[in-house]
């Protein structure tokens, strides 16, 4: 069996380290693989480290926040393994998740990513990363301007998302997340490390684009399921929105050219489309039985345009629907849009959803 190395990049989420490490350890034991688990500690307080002092990990303390890209690079440089797993501590592998990822690498993929589930029970699926093409970026920017463009963008985004959500075997894809990536060492050596010019966000998009340019395949592996608590570090970091904007601008200019990047920036600075009509609370309407009898999808989006969105597939719609308790408890406060969509892709109805602000 090929050697395996695990790199976790931690920043101010000490309570998440143990479940992440234990899940990796259980999966490694399940497949009989001995592996080093390295924790790159980009930021923690001394008294919080007691939460993981008995875990079988090697802690690397850079002395400053290297960013996610820098943390991954530092960890991979410290691990001598043919197969690499890089992850955030807010990802917990489901039982049986590791073998399909590693098998995809053995079958020739240079990189592979899992299906991410948003809640403990796995009812809600997180979306794949958005497409990174000029055509999609332009459509996504125009979607901020009017509902007509937004509806068109949702249709295209939904086809992209469902291609991943409905897959029953590995499919070629660059729409993977750096929250958990399996990578072949030879591909890493050929393509090079993550670009540390991205402090947070878009580092994996940049790397996967370079992977594709080198004609090396990447794939999405639906049998590899992982619970992703999502954005736990960034929610505790006031600079994360600024880092996202800087990373997006850097990626666009490097990928599409300066002129196209300026066009996208101008479109996004334009007045935002009018809001959706007011409506009753979604849970009250669904609990009252306002669901179709056929299979449908419920999409939850933070952006007014309605994408990207997490989804729950309702195979047997029934009254009494509500968000899973664990998801409700950690959903960042603010306005969301819930949309009910038929299996055919036809939008049936939508509601406003307001999550309470967290103290």
Image: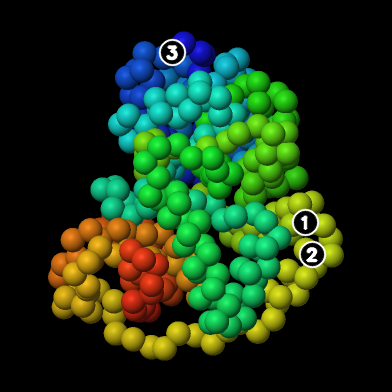
The residue under the point 41% across, 59% down is 310
Camera-nearest label, 2 or 3: 2
- Callout in the foreground (3, 1): 1
Q: Is residue 152 above or below residue 31?
A: below
Locate residue 302 relative to residue 237 in the image: left or right: left
Residue reaching furthest front?
A: 344
Instruction: Classify mark 1: helix, strand or loop.
Output: helix
Q: Which residue is mark 1?
A: 256
x, y percentage for residue 9?
Answer: 55, 36
Q: Quadrant of the C terminus?
A: bottom left
* 279 relative position to 85: left or right: left
| Lower position in the chain sequence, tag 2 or tag 3 | 3
For the image, the number of numbered tags is 3
The image shows residue 202 at horizontal and vertical percentages of 65, 49
Camera-nearest residue between 204 and 46: 204
Give SS at disc 2.
Answer: helix
Name the residue beneath numbered marker 3. 34
Using the rendered view, name the quadrant where residue 216 is placed: top right
Label 1 vs label 2: CA separation?
A: 6 Å
Circle 2 sits on which residue? 260
Element at label 3? loop
Would you say the residues marked 2 and 3 are in contact, meaning their CB atoms lie under 8 Å apart?
no
Determine whether 147 is above or below 55 in the image: below
Mark sitting earlier along the chain (3/1) = 3
Marks 1,2: beta carbons within 8 A = yes
């Amino acid at each position: 069996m090929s050697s395996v190395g695990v790199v976790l990049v931690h920043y101010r989420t000490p309570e998440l380290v143990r479940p992440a490490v234990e899940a990796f350890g259980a999966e490694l034991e399940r497949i009989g693989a001995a592996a080093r688990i390295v924790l790159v500690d980009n930021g923690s307080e001394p008294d919080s480290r007691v939460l993981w002092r008995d875990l079988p990990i090697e802690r690397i303390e850079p002395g400053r926040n290297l960013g996610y890209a820098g943390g991954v690079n530092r960890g991979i440089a410290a691990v001598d393994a043919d197969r690499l797993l890089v992850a955030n501590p807010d990802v917990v592998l489901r039982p049986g998740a590791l073998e399909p990822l590693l098998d995809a690498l053995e079958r020739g993929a240079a990189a592979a990513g899992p299906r991410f589930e948003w809640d403990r029970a796995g009812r809600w699926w997180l979306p794949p990363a958005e497409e990174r093409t000029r055509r999609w970026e332009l459509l996504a920017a125009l979607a901020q301007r009017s509902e007509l463009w937004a509806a068109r963008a949702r249709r295209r985004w939904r086809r992209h998302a469902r291609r991943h959500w409905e897959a029953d075997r590995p499919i070629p894809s660059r729409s993977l997340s750096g929250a958990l990536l399996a990578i072949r060492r030879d591909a890493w050596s050929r393509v090079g490390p993550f670009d540390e010019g991205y402090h947070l966000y878009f580092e994996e998009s940049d790397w996967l684009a370079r992977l594709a340019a080198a004609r090396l395949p990447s794939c999405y592996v639906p049998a590899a399921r992982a619970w992703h608590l999502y954005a736990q570090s960034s929610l505790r970091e006031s600079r994360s929105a600024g880092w996202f904007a800087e990373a997006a601008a850097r990626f666009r200019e490097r990928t599409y050219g300066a002129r196209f990047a300026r066009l996208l920036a101008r479109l996004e600075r334009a007045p935002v489309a009018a809001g959706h009509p007011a409506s009753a609370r979604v849970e009250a309407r669904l609990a009252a039985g306002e669901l179709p009898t056929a299979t449908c999808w419920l999409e939850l989006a933070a952006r007014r345009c309605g994408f990207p969105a997490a989804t729950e597939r309702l195979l047997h719609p029934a009254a009494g629907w509500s968000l899973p308790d664990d998801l409700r408890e950690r959903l960042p406060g603010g306005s969301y849009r819930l949309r009910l969509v038929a299996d055919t892709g036809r939008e049936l109805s939508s509601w406003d959803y307001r999550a309470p602000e967290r103290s």
